[in-house]
Image (cartoon, coloured by chain):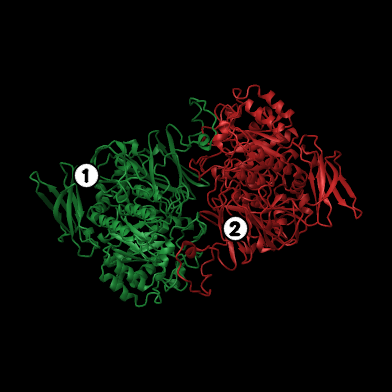
Chain colours: A red, B green
Amino acid sequence: MERIANGIWRLRFGQPETHTPVQLRETEIKMEQLNKLECTGTPPFASHEIEIKEAARGIHIELPLTAEEHIYGFGLQLHRVDHTGRKKIIRVNSDPVADTGDSHAPVPFYVSTAGYGVYVDTSRYATFYCGTNLRKGDSEHKKQEQKAVGTSEIELYGYQTSEGNRTVVVDVPSARGIDVYLFEGPDMATAVGRYNLFSGGGCLPPAWGLGMWYRAYSAAKKEDVMRLANTFRQDNMPVDVFGFEPGWQTKAYSCSFVWDESRFPEHEAMLEELYGMNYRVNLWEHLFVHPTSPMYQDLKPHSGNYEVWEGLVPDLSIPEARRIFAEHHSKEFVTKGIAGFKLDECDSSDFVHSNWSFPDVTEFPSGMDGEQMHNQLGTLYQAAIQAPFEHAGKRTLSQVRASGALASPYPFVLYSDLYNHQVFIRGVVNCGFSGLLWSPEVRQAESPEDLIRRIQTAVFSPMALLNCWRIPNPPWMQVDRDKNVRGEFMDNYKETRDICRSLFEIRMALIPYLYTAYARYYLEGRPPFRALVMDYPDDSNTYAIDDAYMMGESILVAPIISGMTERSVYLPKGTWRCFWTGVSYEGGQAYTFSPGLERIPVFVKEGTLLPLAKPQQCVADDTAFDLTLHQYGDEARACMLYEDDGQTFEYRKGQFNWVKVSIAPDGNIAIDRTGTYEGRRYNIIVTAESG
Amino acid sequence: MERIANGIWRLRFGQPETHTPVQLRETEIKMEQLNKLECTGTPPFASHEIEIKEAARGIHIELPLTAEEHIYGFGLQLHRVDHTGRKKIIRVNSDPVADTGDSHAPVPFYVSTAGYGVYVDTSRYATFYCGTNLRKGDSEHKKQEQKAVGTSEIELYGYQTSEGNRTVVVDVPSARGIDVYLFEGPDMATAVGRYNLFSGGGCLPPAWGLGMWYRAYSAAKKEDVMRLANTFRQDNMPVDVFGFEPGWQTKAYSCSFVWDESRFPEHEAMLEELYGMNYRVNLWEHLFVHPTSPMYQDLKPHSGNYEVWEGLVPDLSIPEARRIFAEHHSKEFVTKGIAGFKLDECDSSDFVHSNWSFPDVTEFPSGMDGEQMHNQLGTLYQAAIQAPFEHAGKRTLSQVRASGALASPYPFVLYSDLYNHQVFIRGVVNCGFSGLLWSPEVRQAESPEDLIRRIQTAVFSPMALLNCWRIPNPPWMQVDRDKNVRGEFMDNYKETRDICRSLFEIRMALIPYLYTAYARYYLEGRPPFRALVMDYPDDSNTYAIDDAYMMGESILVAPIISGMTERSVYLPKGTWRCFWTGVSYEGGQAYTFSPGLERIPVFVKEGTLLPLAKPQQCVADDTAFDLTLHQYGDEARACMLYEDDGQTFEYRKGQFNWVKVSIAPDGNIAIDRTGTYEGRRYNIIVTAESG
């Protein structure tokens, strides 16, 4: 067992494959930050407790799992939070229809309530059997209970969770060797933090990325885009990022990566106009390169041996392929002010009516096969698109539909075509276990109520996105798609719009708080959005909670789904106050709340000094936030705010401040700035009582 | 390319694995029958047209697929009939929730409308990409059409079926070598017949197996069983086979394989009573052996290294394990008159809420791993259970929930917990492509209409089964489960019962016709139930039909689903007559029928002399059928009927007859028996006009 970093060990067996997430990584382990963490010097398991074997099928690993432990992680799991007793395959797939492990962003990493993490370094479709089976003979001496005869499936099958001490079995097909990494705690959150710092730390988005996002109609033309952009500003609907869907390209499915001058004549002038209104522009694309693309001939020798949708699949693990791809993006888009991209369909799909992508046996010039490429494509693509922004010295926050291991440094947020609101909330709960970000995007709604409920989840999520690619007019004007396309608006749309605006403004108010949470993600690996179990691993009431989560250090969010008029919220130990009213609740128990349509249950830890900004229409490069500090409880801890230029990479050189705001015993505000960033992004103007 | 048999070739690459369906087979190729078929002497492809490679992931095969071809097969596919343009994984799985290839009985065999079959001899989770992807560069010179921008998923994605000539790519993981078998046509049905004869021919069930089946309540006790058994005979509801669900055993999930004397005191006397009423008894079980089973200690050294539901997983590829298993079944059950078994949960499950089974990395004493065992378990289990019946010289027809390659000789019918009626009908359409039988069992119903619609499909299917394990009283007395459990019956249940009885009687009338179809399955490999495309491969209107099928040589069945009052039926070229009324329809076109609740559209080929038996309550060992020959059309071809003792294996020694019945020009019946069977099972008593 080799010590890799403070609290991180590696167990090597045989000859590991050459194309694994660690081998392919471009980011550096955050050694300095890891060294700041306490650690025992003892790995979570001794070498002899972990069994590793090779067989025709590949590598087989078996790790201990005690009776009391519960395990979490495996990436963006949308169907379940607690994976104990379940089988999970680490296979990238859009629209995972059942709880199989398939995911937009599967990650071979898990974390235990016992306070450690395990990462298996593979791009293969590894399967984790999390305490599903006992070994032969283990049940021989159990007490035999006579059960009643089952007359339903659930009575007969139950769950195949084995009782007592069991194991986690990991099946890594095709491999002839493996590296297993162990991450010390002492608790879940620290183990996850170590994994994120091992990955290179969390990403720090530009400040504007935390504002509101709006993606426009797929078939929109220049005049439609400008009409929307003007309307948002006229109606005071905060929007930071304006997204173009496939129609901006001359060819899509597969892609030309060229502006379509028929729909967008003089597109550079249009962009300048949008920039002038302080919109950031995001362009949709996917990876598959159509024969009409200017990159086609150059990328052809560096592509896999099968096409997808008549397009090349470039091998982005090859530096030359990445260079060609990045240079086109740099020259045509990033230097022309494009702020980010939406990287679609890098996930592949087995479960939809029209399954698609390249075969698992595809041969790539690097020597990777299709299976490995499927699980790596999301991160390779993110790295390729990140490059021109690095070159330009400008941060992006972008979107991606697939990701995987060691992805936390990439400023990309996941999304999905799946559209169950409950599943989307579960994504927010789960993403933090594995160094991922997730946007429960609002795309369509059954009713104004559904629209509002979904927006509420979105504004309390890693990315607040309305993805209106199927409707030409904003959803608050008409939720019915057909009527929206025909331009028929709801009678009471202004009422709906006003509620939406107030929710957008809450998001805009939360930006400094969220930005600080992201800074901790970058510096400490601490996820900005977390399952309750991660902060309360000793409280078994939190183990199965998949409909509420922590946002930053102090806020607990419990979204509501259309049709619900009340919901139960379990508040962990400690005192909590209602975000909206300041009313106090003692934790360690569940309460039922019915906050009406305009609110969802949101709670703030007692003793929090919560900074809320005066909502603006957008975050411009020079925006400074006017902050009101809301005090929850009679005595409040100091509020720590992270401050930097919000847009460049100077923070990596230490150009940032920590702003400590506290209330002195005399009631005065004390502001203490430490750091070398010379700008000022926060005007602390007033404090207020909670509620 | 090695010639294996008449019209069958093998292409070997590298060193094939030691545990494949062909290596593990216990049945013999039907050389004599194969030699009767015409063949060109030229394989469907030349060796150089098939590319086979080895890579880290395993073996990769690529075969031609022309633009016009459509391909079918891959076992019991429940989600689609025509697999062209689709990816299919050959992985055994209950409850396949999407069109991925996962199936109770996946088979690495496909057949083309161009008139050939391909079988890849592997127990691995092989994936077939059926014309999904072109090779790199293939799209470069295509005409580029400018399409409108898509504003919905289907517009954007379409199907990823590649146009023009493409390939079938087969991915066989872990293997270092492979045998590919090619089956000549000249047509689809002949290619399938060759595959079935290569497998050992189709099974020939006992005559009673083609009657009605009823499985009783899981929690039934002796008195409940006898009450049901008596009621069926009193009410003249034909039932041949009476099935016991898990409650007959002292322990189930996992199994003891021992009668529970508390629920079934003096069970041997009960069985004698049932036998005296001419019931055949079928016992539920699964493979997992509980510590309390008398077989446990003997099987332990021959079992895999993980448990399922606290039970052993015996390695039935080991002769000693199979001997122990078979001997217990022989001694305790078969010699005591048990007529068959229901082999449950040999499929494993990834898609249900309570996924279960042994890991793919399980080590079995034979050297097989869990992946191979999953795909082989169904056929190994069938072989083990078939053994005591072979020993006793008594045929069985049994049930099994998993099957695979080369399974046609086993007299086992597949079933599933999936319960969509449309999906169940599709199973009947698809099973015949791959040497499988399928029962669209009736388990529960939303309404009397739904019950009747489902029974109509069942009586025109390979096995006519009511699986009432969740209800203590017959469904025709009460369809609502809760009321059924409480003993509350429908007001008009006698009306429903009468319709059910008349449907059961149709099944009983069809037994001689069906038995003859099964004889052709045995002798020629011709499936008794077939998709229309198999008989009409040149008619592209049949390619996508997944809701109608051929039963035997002359009957086309088009089931109706609850809620439908009419349906469209495409009749292939030729003249067809309504089974019920004799009305004539010219084929090559679709018609809409609304036959009312008591009937479904069933058609008979013009010129058929259809034998229908006088319905009996059951098929006893000495039953002879009183046959009425129904003439469809003015001139009828001779009717061929197969005849043997219906219960032993003497037919394998040639102890059977072909009974040719024809109408002489003077209207008299001419009966011509050829063969050496001395008994007489058919009394041909009368002819009737159709309808």
Q: Residues within 10 Å of mark 2 (few under 14, many from 20)?
A: many
Q: Is residue B351 above or below residue B170?
A: below
Q: Is residue B421 above or below residue B341?
A: above
**Residue ranking furthest to the left:** B666
User: What is the three-letter code of the residue carrying label 2?
Assistant: His
Q: Is residue A690 above or below residue A290?
A: below
Residue at image mark 1: B582
Q: How far apart, in angstroms, are the residues tagged by discs 2 and 1?
A: 60 Å
Locate residue B299: give its quadrant: bottom left
Q: Secondary structure at mark 1?
A: loop
Q: Which residue is mark 2?
A: A83
Q: Is residue B373 left or right of residue B449?
A: right
Specify the amino acid type for callout 1: Gly
Counting from the top left corner in percent of width and height, residue A293 is at 58, 27
**Which residue lies most toward the right here?**
A666
For label 1, count other residues whose C-alpha is less than 10 Å away and answer few (under 14), some (14-19) or many (20+): some
